[in-house]
Amino acid sequence: MTTQFRDVPAAQRFEQGFTDAQGQTRAVFADYAVQGQTRLILHVEADPALRGGGASGRFMQALAEHARAEGLKLHPVCGYAVAWLKRHPEYGDVMA
């Protein structure tokens, strides 16, 4: 099961829940900084129980789709976010 992607502006964090192998909902999140309509993606982290299962990639896809829908631009600082966005040129329109 996956919970809905959400933006938590008060915490400057995007987050989404995914179910691990034991049925527990665990989080993947990205901390960000705001620069106008651009979000600097500072850090992406998945709960250790989710690592290696593709949850972070699904989260990044949801993040890119959210940015597109909201008219936001993403400037990845985190190495994972940089690498993911390079591997997915279909989201080039959301890159700052």
Image (cartoon, rainbow, N blue to C red):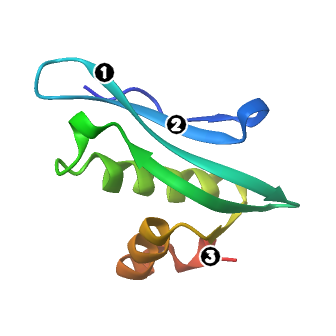
Q: Earlier in the sequence, mark 1 or mark 2?
A: 2
In the rendered image, residue 57, in percent from the top left (x then y), is placed at 32, 56
Q: Residues within 10 Å of mark 3 (few under 14, many from 20)?
A: some
CB under 8 Å between discs 1 and 2: no
Residue 25 sits above or below residue 90 on the image: above
Pick whichever, 96 or 29, lies toward us.
29
The residue that mark 3 highlights is 95
Pick whichever, 72 or 83, lies toward us.
83
In the rendered image, residue 28, in percent from the top left (x then y), is placed at 41, 40
50 left or right of 42 in image: left
Please name the residue shown 17% across and 51% down the image.
Answer: 52
CB under 8 Å between discs 2 and 3: no
The image quarter containing residue 60 is: bottom left
Give the residue type at disc 1: Thr
Label 2 secondary element: strand
Q: Earlier in the sequence, mark 2 or mark 3?
A: 2
| Front tag of 3 and 1 | 1
86 left or right of 66 in image: left
The quadrant of the rendering that contains the C terminus is bottom right
Q: Residues within 10 Å of mark 2 (few under 14, many from 20)?
A: many
Please name the residue shown 48% across and 53% down the image.
Answer: 44
The residue that mark 1 highlights is 25
Which label sits on residue 15? 2
14 left or right of 60 in image: right
Give the residue type at disc 2: Glu
Q: Earlier in the sequence, mark 3 or mark 1?
A: 1
61 left or right of 40 in image: left
Please name the residue shown 34% across and 51% down the image.
Answer: 56
Residue 94 sits above or below residue 64 on the image: below
Residue 13 sits above or below residue 34 on the image: above
